[in-house]
Amino acid sequence: MTLARHHGGGVIVLTFLLALLLTIIPLPEWLRYLRPDWVGLVLIYWCLALPERVGVSTGWLMGLLVDMLTGTLLGQHAMALTIVAFLTLRFHQRIRLFPIWQQALTVLVLLVLHQLLALWVSRFIGRPGPPWYYWAHSLMGMIVWPPVYFALRSLRRGFRVS
């Protein structure tokens, strides 16, 4: 029996740390809603690229970190990112075959699902509804998916992350 050796775990961790940093960097009020869901994008990429290493538990952990860093209800993003990771893993073989523009549409659906679940929890605990431009996060995520995908792919290949 041979055990496969994994390489580049530090690169995966660093990309998630960068995504968390981009999530909490202060922005002007008018630009705040144009910030893509960086953690969601990085999670989707690594679930597609390395489904045997990054999965549901990673989504849960990253969601808890997002909850702690952003001050939202503990478990709100953890639940949503866990479901996003599960669906990405469930359909990763199909999504990987899509051209990049279809992947971007799939990422849009996954990010909208993340926002819907977070909104559901917020509304359940009695917080007021968000403005109409609340959904701009997901649209920006779809727009930046191609450069994020190509940047992470070149990073993965450059450092031979497996």
Image (spheres, rainbow, N blue to C red):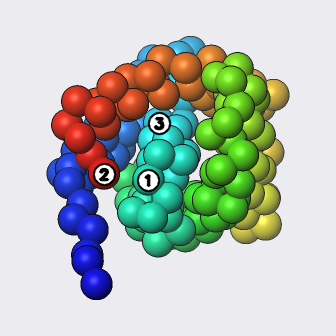
Indicate the position of residue 95 as horizontal and vertical percent values: 68, 41
From the viewer's side, name the closer residue of 162 and 31: 162
Alpha-carbon distance for marks 3 and 2? 22 Å
Of 10 and 158, nearer the camera is 158
- Outermost residue, front direction? 1
Instruction: State whether residue 3 appears in this view.
Output: yes
The residue tagged 3 is: 38
SS under mark 2:
loop
Q: Is residue 33 visible?
A: no
Evaluate if marks 3 and 2 touch, with contact meaning CB atoms under 8 Å apart.
no
Question: Reading the chain from its start, which is encountered first: label 3 or label 2?
Answer: 3
Circle 2: residue type: Ser
Occupied quadrant, residue 79:
bottom right
For discs 3 and 1, the disc positioned in front in the rendered view: 1
Side of 4 where 115 appears, left or right:
right
Residue 89 horizontal/vertical position (percent): 61, 59
Q: Identify the image quadrant of residue 107.
A: top right
Residue highlighted by disc 2? 162
Q: Are marks 2 and 1 in contact (CB under 8 Å)?
A: yes
Sequence-first disc among 3 and 1: 3
Question: Which numbered tag is attached to residue 41?
Answer: none
- Is 4 placed above or below 145 here? below
